[in-house]
Image (tube, grey):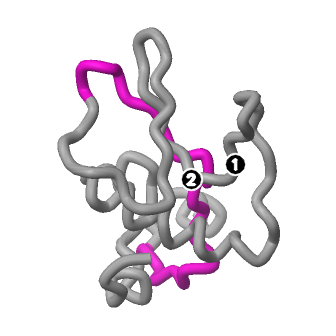
Amino acid sequence: MGIFSRLFKRHKPQASSAVDVPLPILVHSHARDAVPPGVLEKGMTALEMDDVVLHAVSGILLPDGIVGDLPEDRMEWARRLTYHHLKREGCLADYGIPVIPAYDAEESC
């Protein structure tokens, strides 16, 4: 009985620190006709393709269209920017990202 109760018990959600939450740096895409309203945050780039619009952190899309790496000293900035962008669009939960109070306390990146 002990092994089954451990396997099937409900886990209580634990508070996550901002560092523990995975945030996609190459953010996400929208169907061209379903892009949320509003101005992109400073530091975000919209790349329009045939049927989709990709929202990404500026600096990871190279001029030739290849995805590059951000310097290590820009990673936290990119995490915060990504969080604020996804929150504004109302899709934090779609990516399994909880509310991060430390990031919410900021006005902008």
Q: Quadrant of residue 35?
A: top left
Give the Cα separation between the discs numbered 2 and 1. Answer: 6 Å
Amino acid beneath label 2: Val
Residue at 44%, 76% (x, y): give it.
109
Q: Nearer the viewer, residue 25 or 67?
A: 67
The residue carrying mark 2 is: 57
Residue at 45%, 49% (x, y): give it.
95
Determine whether label 2 and label 1 are within 8 Å by CB: yes
Residue at 47%, 70% (x, y): give it.
11
Magenta residues, dominant SS class: loop
**Mark number displayed over residue 73:** none
- State the image coordinates of residue 28 (x, y, percent, origin top left): 49, 39
Task: Judge whether 87 appears above or below 66 on screen.
Answer: below
Q: Nearer the viewer, residue 12 or 95?
A: 95
Q: Residue furthest front?
A: 63
Label 1: how many residues lie within 10 Å, few (<14), some (14-19) or many (20+)?
A: some
Q: Is residue 18 magenta?
A: yes
The residue carrying mark 1 is: 60
Task: Judge whether 22 appears above or below 27 on screen.
Answer: below
Q: Residue furthest left?
A: 37
Residue at 54%, 84% (x, y): give it.
17
Label 2: how many residues lie within 10 Å, few (<14), some (14-19) or many (20+)?
A: many
- State the image coordinates of residue 41 (x, y, percent, origin top left): 37, 59
Start-end of magenta stretch: 12-34
Q: Is residue 90 magenta?
A: no
Q: Quadrant of residue 32?
A: top left
Secondary element at tag 1:
loop
- State the image coordinates of residue 102 (x, y, percent, origin top left): 43, 88
Amino acid beneath label 1: Ile
| Left or right side of 75 for 47 | left
